[in-house]
Image (tube, grey):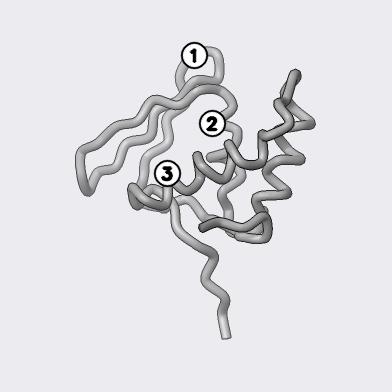
Amino acid sequence: MLTENAKPVANPTVVFREEFDDWSVLFDPETGAAFGMSPVSSLIWKTLDGRHTIADILIEVEKKCRNIPDDAASHIREFVQSLLDRGLAGHEVKKG
């Protein structure tokens, strides 16, 4: 389970394509699967760089969105976990 200190990273083989009104599509060339994403999901995807924690991502969402629910952190964790489960994102790898 993801913690607020986890630093997820987007899978570099996944294609991210922005569409109209900040909606986007993720395409996994390995599986052929495509996933539509809302503007908030797109914002979260853009922060999956291995440097931002879940807590950092929440801060970015709070800066750029209105009417954030009190349980937004848990929604972000669930969304990122679903990306991890599908192989669309991974965990930060620390270099020794």
Residue 57 location in percent, x, y? 68, 44
Quadrant location, the C terminus? bottom right
Disc 2 and disc 1: Cα gap in Å?
A: 12 Å
Task: Please identify the residue farthest to the bottom as the structure is shown.
Answer: 96
Q: Which circle, 3 or 1, is nearer the viewer? A: 3
- Which residue is the site of mark 2? 42
Q: Are the residues at dot 3 and dot 1 in contact (C-beta closer than 8 Å)?
A: no
Tell me if 75 is positioned left or right of 79 in this view.
right
Tell me the kind of residue under disc 3: Ser
- Which residue is the site of mark 1? 20
Residue 41 location in percent, x, y? 53, 31
- Which residue is the site of mark 3? 82
Q: Residue at x 74, y 19 (%)?
A: 67
Tell me the kind of residue under disc 1: Phe
Q: Which numbered disc flags the more N-terminal residue, 3 or 1? A: 1
Disc 3 and disc 2: Cα gap in Å?
A: 14 Å
Tell me if 12 is positioned left or right of 80 in this view.
left
Disc 3 and disc 1: Cα gap in Å?
A: 24 Å
Say what secondary structure mark 1 lies in: helix
Q: Which numbered disc flags the more N-terminal residue, 2 or 1? A: 1
Tell me if 23 is positioned left or right of 86 in this view.
right
Residue 10 location in percent, x, y? 47, 50
Q: Which numbered disc flags the more N-terminal residue, 3 or 2? A: 2
Crowding near the residue tagged with mark 2, few <14, some 14–19, many ≥20 C-alpha atoms within 10 Å: some
